[in-house]
Amino acid sequence: MTAHFDDAILARRLAQGTGEILKGVRNVGLLRGRNLGDAGDELSQNWIARVLEQHRPDDGVLSEEAADNPARLAKDRVWIIDPLDGTKEFATGRQDWAVHIALVEHGTPIVAAVGLPDLGVVFASDDVKAVSGPLSRKIVISHNQPPEVAKFVANKMNFETTLMGSAGAKAMHVLLGDADAYIHAGGQYEWDSAAPVGVCTAAGLHCSRLDGSSLNYNNKDTYLPDLLICRPELAEEILELVAAYREEHGSY
């Protein structure tokens, strides 16, 4: 008989277990580079898929590492996952990689967990609060695709920009107060942001598209090109500056 776990516990354990699998694969030192990244992607995806098949067989699933099943579009409940967000960072020994687990209902993440395995922590939407206090005056951005709009905003606000890998790692650094905002433009998919947005929204942070519109998940087209996660008191100013940048340059 299979034990029953509620959605929040299941999400947390999926993030924790996936992180342990990935650390185990990497820490024995038998693979490196692309082979290590590919093994991490494959093994973590296989384990998550088996867990969801056993514990949530009626739910839909959307994962970066699996072929898309259009049947998810007719489901009220869909798990959106990225078993290894930041494969390059993972494979090169960096710490800024993450595990993303989100349960979406009617387009909105209702349960989410983001694991930062090298830090030994899982952030879960059922028990999370953003760090408040003095501003760090930092905006975290992608080191692979640093967006010019973020540099523009940082310059106008007299903030610094900090480069980092995984979207989950960047979002959690805003939650921890190490940065005040995470600005992304230039391309992402639903699995890149569903879990971070679920956790950060539960923590009281502002989460939206760069035009201020809401983030909606489980779409036929899974491309979700831009994202803003920030302290709520900064959202209006940042969105105004982003709009000014777009008016001047025609895009983000």
Image: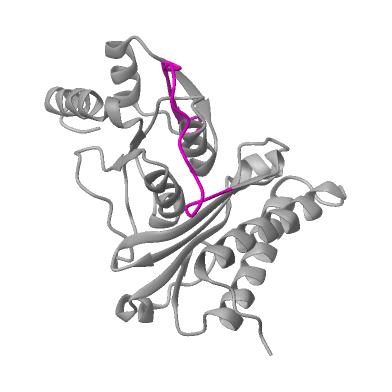
Residue 221, percent from left and from top? 30, 63
Quarter-wise, where is residue 33 in the image? top right
> On screen, 21 above or below 137?
below
Q: Is residue 129 magenta?
A: yes
Q: Which residues are magenta?
A: 123-144
How many numbered callouts? 0
Quadrant of the frame with the C terminus: top left
Helix, strand or loop: magenta stretch: loop
> On screen, 181 above or below 39?
above
Quadrant of the frame with the N terminus: bottom right
The answer to which of 50 and 35 lies nearer the viewer is 50
Residue 209, percent from left and from top? 26, 43
Q: For the view shown, which residue lies furthest in the bottom direction?
A: 1
Q: Judge whether residue 109 can be spotted in this image.
A: yes
- Residue at the (33%, 66%) spot, across then down: 218
Residue 230, percent from left and from top? 35, 32
Residue 98, percent from left and from top? 59, 47
Quarter-wise, where is residue 206 in the image? top left
The answer to which of 54 and 247 lies nearer the viewer is 54
Q: For the view shown, which residue lies furthest in the left direction?
A: 247
Direction from residue 246 to residue 32 in the image, left or right: right
Q: Looking at the image, what colour scheme do you see?
A: one colour
> On screen, 116 above or below 54?
above
Direction from residue 186 to residue 62 in the image, left or right: right
- Residue at the (48%, 72%) spot, across then down: 67
Q: For the view shown, which residue lies furthest in the top direction?
A: 158
Q: Judge whether residue 184 can be spotted in this image.
A: no
- Residue at the (79%, 55%) spot, across then down: 25
Q: Is residue 142 magenta?
A: yes
> On screen, 42 above or below 153?
below
